[in-house]
Image (cartoon, rainbow, N blue to C red):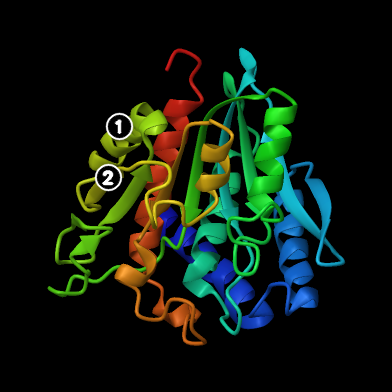
Amino acid sequence: MAQERIRTQRIREHISTLASDIGERNLYQYDRLAAAADFIDRSWTSLGYHVKQQLYEAKGLQFANLEVELTGTDRPEEIIIIGAHYDTHRKSPGANDNGSAIAALLELAHACAGKTFPRTLRLVAFTNEEHPFTRTTEMGSRVYARRCRERREKIRAMICLETIGYCSEQKGSQRLSFMGLLLPRQGDFIALVGNTRSKELLRETHRLFSLRPNLPCESLTLPTNFPGAWSSDHWSFWKEGYPAIMVTDTAPLRYPYYHTPRDTSEKISYDFLTGVIDGLEAVIASLVRSGS
């Protein structure tokens, strides 16, 4: 329990830095976007990682995807990617979208620091997921996934973390329909979304999350071009034919402050978010095993 409290406190500090100290971070607040990238870089460096930057130009400016890697000891060519975008929607401080996911990425880096795994593990912070880059060739994860394909990298799994920090036990807090598919009325679960190519990854991730008694999990397999299924960085990997899933609290279907100035750090359900990160640790432990 003490370790959980320490973890939750670190998560609070990460989100406070991103949403309160830095705030809105995107093309329109370029200096703050750079400050967020620097915060992630320094956080990873302090844990002993070597941070790689993938730089590219868009709209006359330079942007950076950030990556740390733990090279596999048995099958280093087989790569597991956990990724999240660090930019925000315009005029939003982005505590949940997507500070919650970046906090998770930093906390997973903390948990994995100094460890070795049979397969290679990469943690990647993507830039430019939000408008005007969404589902364009200048989207950070699109640039990254294309490079993976050009290098013929063997991505065994990509897990996208997208708006993962809010829950409500109130009945009616969850919109019932997700693209026409029924969901529980209570917004206290974590959702997993994959396409048909990602069914095995989705099934294994759902199994591992379901082992957590206090964290309900719902999963959906949808066609790649199904409206709404492509709403984050996993889409970029689908475009390149890689297995990828999105982990999400369902964002606007539950979170009333989505893409607004009220997406602030006090809105986060920190115990829920800590549970999601615990579940992600278990997923990583399974995926990095060379026999799985």
Question: Looking at the picture, which amino acid does disc 1 mark?
Answer: Arg
Task: State which quarter of the image contains the C terminus.
Answer: top left
Amino acid carrying label 2: it is: Ser
* Separation (CA) of disc 1 from disc 2: 8 Å
List x then y, in percent, for residue 5: 42, 61
- Tell which circle, 1 or 2, labels the residue nearer the N-terminal end: 1
Identify the residue position indicated by label 2 in the image: 219
Residue 120 x %, y %: 62, 26
Compared to residue 205, the image places residue 99 above or below, namely below
Judging depth in this view, the residue of 10 and 217 nearest the camera is 217
In the rendered image of this protein, does residue 232 appear above or below residue 271?
above
Q: Which residue is mark 1?
A: 203
In front: 119, or 222? 222
Label pair 1/2, CB-CB below 8 angstroms: yes
**Numbered label tally:** 2
Q: Is residue 1 visible?
A: no
Q: Nearer the viewer, residue 106 or 154?
A: 154
Percent position of residue 162, x then y: 47, 57
Residue drawn at (68%, 74%) of the image? 25
Residue plotted at (36% across, 46% down)? 193
Snapshot quadrant of residue 87: bottom right
Instruction: Give the image location of residue 178, x and y in percent.
Output: 26, 59
